[in-house]
Amino acid sequence: MQALIYERELWRRQAACERLGVPTRIFFSEDLGEIAQAKNTCVNCPVIEECLEGAIHRREPWGVWGGQLFRNGHILATKRRRGRPSNVARPEDQLPVIPIPVRIQRELLSA
Ligand code: SF4
């Protein structure tokens, strides 16, 4: 039990969102700009795979975890701005695409 707690703490200390003091709210925001900011924080996180695996196993209902956007336990490829879709593409609405590691993709396909 002690080792498990230590392992959890060690993992948390390496997290980019913890180390950089990034506001937690951006990881649970509806704003596309903040979601993009959260995903960009994850890109450089040394524990991105562990974070993503944990979120998949917990079926996270909400938020950005391991560089991916979760809703109702599933990874969303994209997200639209609220309201009527614009006739003109808005580059600022494009969320960063962070590839899912092949090992985790295989696990998702075999589940
Ligand atoms: S992958 Fe993203 S959400 Fe997960 S610990 Fe790293 S920065 Fe935080």
Image: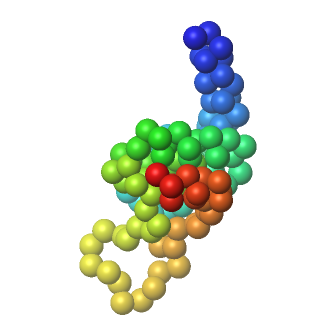
Q: Quadrant of the N terminus?
A: top right
Residue extending farthest to the front is: 110
Dividing the image into four equal quarters, which quarter contains ligand 1?
Answer: top right
Above or below 23: residue 78: below
Q: Position of residue 93 (x, y in %)?
A: 47, 73
> How many labels were placed on the picture?
0
Instruction: Give the residue at x 43% y 48%.
Output: 63
Could you tell me if residue 22 is visible in this image?
no
Could you tell me if residue 6 is visible in this image?
yes
Q: From the viewer's perspective, is 84 left or right of 24?
A: left
Residue extending farthest to the top is: 2
Q: Position of residue 61 (x, y in %)?
A: 36, 46
Instruction: Give the residue at x 43% y 38%.
Output: 58
Instruction: Give the residue at x 47% y 67%.
Output: 77
Above or below 85: residue 78: above
> Which is nearer the eye, 85 or 105?
105
Instruction: Give the residue at x 63% y 30%.
Output: 12
Q: Position of residue 62 (x, y in %)?
A: 38, 47
Residue extending farthest to the left is: 84
> Which is nearer the eye, 61 or 42?
61
Q: Position of residue 78 (x, y in %)?
A: 45, 68
Q: From the viewer's perspective, is 19 left or right of 63?
A: right
Q: How is the image coloured?
A: rainbow
